[in-house]
Amino acid sequence: MRRPLALVGIAFLASIAAGSAAAIPPAANVTPLPELAAQQVPFDGIVLQLPKTWFPLASPSSSQVVGLFRAPEQKDGLYVNLDVVAEPLGKARTLEDWLGTTIDPSYLKVGAIRIVSVHGVHGIEYSSTKAVAFHSKPVFTDAYFFVYRDAVLQFTYSSFASDRVQYAPLFAASAQTIRFGANAAGSSGVYGG
């Protein structure tokens, strides 16, 4: 069964993605980026950097969410956030196969997709301001997908679409800091297996 990009729960929103492998480009700073600090994702040694003011929340025990982080302030009920979801790769042999059999194609039509590389691990970035809404307001979704071991990890950053110019550089800078555990470059730890 195909489903929407990811989660729409606990005031956290999610998403997905194919292009030519290149490192995520450094974001052009429209406003200065906040100071970043390392955060541990409670899943197999994954670390990334987020603004120092962001904090982790407890992940729902019955879900595939392995990390929830959010800014302390909210705007119209939405906290700028990152959610990290781990789903089994299953019978798919590549990330593209997984996306093609898991994600509703209508989401792909309303976003931009490209292949990225973070510390040698290849993945897919999907960004959109039309795929998700929160209380009828469009949400900017910037999602990064990677195969890590036998799971697909989705790192989904969200803010209101009207704040995209402010948050896109921050989301890109944070995504560039994702570091996988020691075995990330193993046979199933790299895009395309």
Image (cartoon, rainbow, N blue to C red):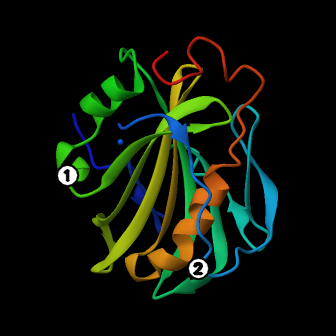
The front one of 63 and 132 is: 132
Image location of residue 168, percent across then percent down? 52, 68
Q: Is mark 1 on a helix, strand or loop?
A: loop
**Residue placed at 82% from the left, 61% from the top?**
37
Total marks placed: 2
- Residue drawn at point x = 78 percent, y = 53 percent: 39
- Assess disc 1: are there few (<14), some (14-19) or many (≥20) residues with their C-alpha within 10 Å of its C-alpha: few
Comes first in the chain, label 2 or label 1: 2
- In the picture, measured across the screen, residue 12 lies left or right of residue 109, that is right
Name the amino acid type tagged 1: Lys
Residue 173 place in picture, x, y as percent: 65, 59
Amino acid at the residue labelled 2: Val
Identify whether 136 is placed above or below 169: below
Label 2, label 1: how far apart the Cα atoms are: 28 Å
Residue at label 2? Answer: 30
Q: Is residue 153 visible?
A: no
